[in-house]
Image: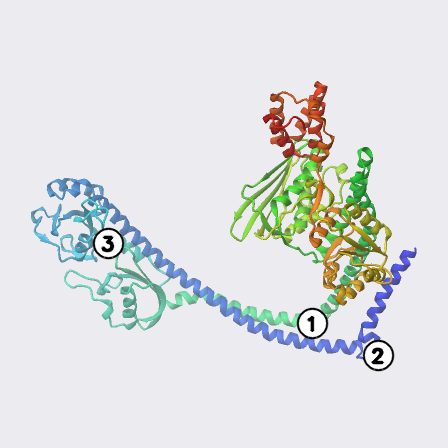
Amino acid sequence: MNNHVSSNQSQTGLWNRWIRRSPTLSDPTKKSPSALFKSKRVWTRMVLGGTAVFVCIASYWSYQQIRNLLLENLQEKAFLEVQQGANEIDRWIGDKKATLSAIANNPTFRTMDWDTIEPYLVIEERRLPDFFYLGMTDADMFLYTTDTPERNGTIDLSDRQHVQGAMAGIDSLSDPLLSRSSNGLRIVVFSIPTFSGEATSDNPLGEPIGAVNAVIGVDKIEEVVNNLQSGENSYAFALNSKGEAIVHPNAELMSTIETPAPSLLDYDDPGLADVAQRLTNQEAGLNLFEIDGEQQYVAYVPLTEADWSVALVIPRSNIEGQLRPLDWMALVVVGLTGTMLVVLWQVQSFEQQQLKRSKAAADMANEAKSEFLANMSHELRTPLNGILGYAQILEQTLEGKERDGVNVIYQCGSHLLTLINDVLDLSKIEARKLELASIAVHLPSLLQSVVEMCRIKAEQKGIDFIYHPSPELPKGVGVDEKRLRQVLINLLGNAIKFTEAGAVTLRVDVETLSEADVSLRFQIIDTGVGIAQADLAKLFEAFEQVGDHKKQSEGTGLGLAISQRIVQLMGGSVEVRSQRGVGSEFFFTVDLPLAKDWVQQQSASGAGRIIGYEGEKRYSILVVDDRWENRAVLSSLLEPLGFTILDAENGQVGLEVLGTQDPDLVILDLAMPVMNGFEFLRHIRSTDELQQTIVLVSSASVSQADQQMVRKHGGNDFLAKPVDAAELFQLIAKHLHLRWTYQTEQENLESKALPPTDMVVPPRQILEELLVLAERNRVQELRSQLEQLKNSDTTYVPFAESLLKLARQFRSEEIETLLQQHLTGEVTHV
């Protein structure tokens, strides 16, 4: 009841403060609410009026932009039509050139002996009916054909440009001309060089020794050009390099046997002459010209296989007429916009009031929730600091069942701390206050620490844990180490929890790798119970749990929801594939920047238990905290390592200690009576003699805002409560530049080892079998083999027990080393 009253009083206090801060409610001389509302309404009307003008201008601008885009699209469509036609003609010419090139460089043709070549060309004419006839031009440019054998060797073609081009080693063809022998049909003549086949420094095919001549009609060119169109009254034509019409719907502009074609460059119509000039210049484009007294679009494209160009003339109305529906639509939109503004003008006032009420209610609810969660977090973390702190201390001193019992206490306290952190994280995400703090980290060490933690849980359940890192895995990346570890442990923890047999696999693959960043794909695969399709939709919702009801009691239902939102902040998304009774696969991909200034993280657990620090100097640390249990935890952790611990129950006493002592480091709480942590920091940072004092702020208020406030007031670093011993030691080593000394498990084993004469090593075959299991990291099978070895022969008990101690801690590499030493005879005991 007292708590309820206190809460009401607090809310009343907040309300009263809001009342006092509100000028219209606290000061009767100010304008009345109705007057303020009227002035705001006038202001709103003015804003809406300005908005109407702005909307009209913006609408007109948007209309013009859309109209221009559509016009460009229609113009581009017309240009592409001509481009496709030109490409089709180029392909036809290119195919013919390729066919004739094969004939020209056939061994038979290279003989340049007409008696030998003529039968060969007769056969080729039957195979290639498109050509009227084939012939040969010798090195002196005299013509031999199957069409007029009586004139072979007498027709000199040395003045023909296409023959000159062929003798220069270039595939050539003539401009279209009228064939008198074919009743005036329009033809082109291909002239393709024949090479000697003897390579020279300039040409690997050798020097030109002649050419194949081939005559073919221009029906294909006429077909393609005549098929180009873009609406009524549009027409297409093609010009040669002289501006003469190859294909044109106006017969007066085409050549006849009696009259050669006039050049359009000299045509009376300036617009058509301008188009002809652009075509002969081999230009490409679409422009507006005045032709025949009308504005018309002309799209023109040059060929690549010949000095010709193709053009399409389109009446302007054919293109711009398609924009009329848009013009009518614009008028309709203007009318609708005006109507909409009138309606908005009427309902704006009501909506504004509703919005204010909703926003005020939401702000109050969020503020109350944040304040409640922050207070509860602080109150729960304070006793947990004592519980987890002493659990870590006792775990280092006790053995056997007592140590197991303390470990249970630590695990339960850690679970409660995880629940507190999960609720706070979810609250931050919902309030959009959770930010990622990316730092340079050693990625393999980060992943290995997660693997070691999860492998222990998997081995305890009797299932395999498989880790497949990519061989291309970068060493250093920029990432929020804490959040990435949190996501991986959540996903792997769920996989282990719902897997009773088989294996849990973590795959980390590199999808793309550049000089600046890397794309990593994480996959967590299990052979567990799987997830029903109906449950997948609600899998990532907060406080939702699916699957086995017995397993649901082991969690809070927040892990997946938080993991999904953290990965989304990283730019990815957690996805899942699952089949009931088969297993599940969770995967996500994130892009991370590469980091070259990473510092490889060393695991204290891997190095052994810290027993002191190097050097003769002994350091002193001042602990300022109003809770004696918090001071006792830090004192019990640090005094056995050789530190001198000074303590103070508040900031004022801490300043008095600093006046008489000179500690090397201060560990400071924030919430204290008499003088709190912030006042303590302000005082020492403003005092010349104390400015350089190193201060680690240790608080149960762990929000980002609190941590930023700590650094703003001069704190060197932040240590969250409950205090984690490993993090405490890391920060002390960082700021005092210490190097820890460790008591490793190997030293413990050596101190307890039997004399060499008492150690009996099994046969070489057994040692090799054990080494294979250790190399494959098959710890469970290795332990089973060692247990069998103990039971089979008691003389092997010392040997087996020494390896079992390492196996229980999953120290496979040390086991491998010892077994290899036994096999090479370098040691006689473990």
Return the residue found at the far front.
Answer: 616
Picture quarter with the C terminus: top right
> Farthest residue in the top direction?
792
Q: Are marks 1 and 2 in contact (CB under 8 Å)?
A: no
Cα–Cα gap, marks 1 and 3: 72 Å
Other residues around mark 2 within 10 Å, as few (<14) / some (14–19) / many (≥20): few
Of residues 581 and 312, the one drawn nearer to the viewer in this rendering: 581
Point out the tag, 1 or 2, that comes first from the N-terminus. Answer: 2
Return the x and y of residue 520 as percentages of the image width and height. Answer: 57, 47
Judge whether 794 appears above or below 300 on screen: above
User: Up-down: is 683 above or below 477?
Assistant: below
Q: Residue at x 35, y 58 (%)?
A: 83
Q: Which residue is mark 3?
A: 218
Residue type, mark 3 in image: Val
Indicate which disc residue 346 carries.
Answer: 1
Residue 782 occupies which quadrant of the picture? top right
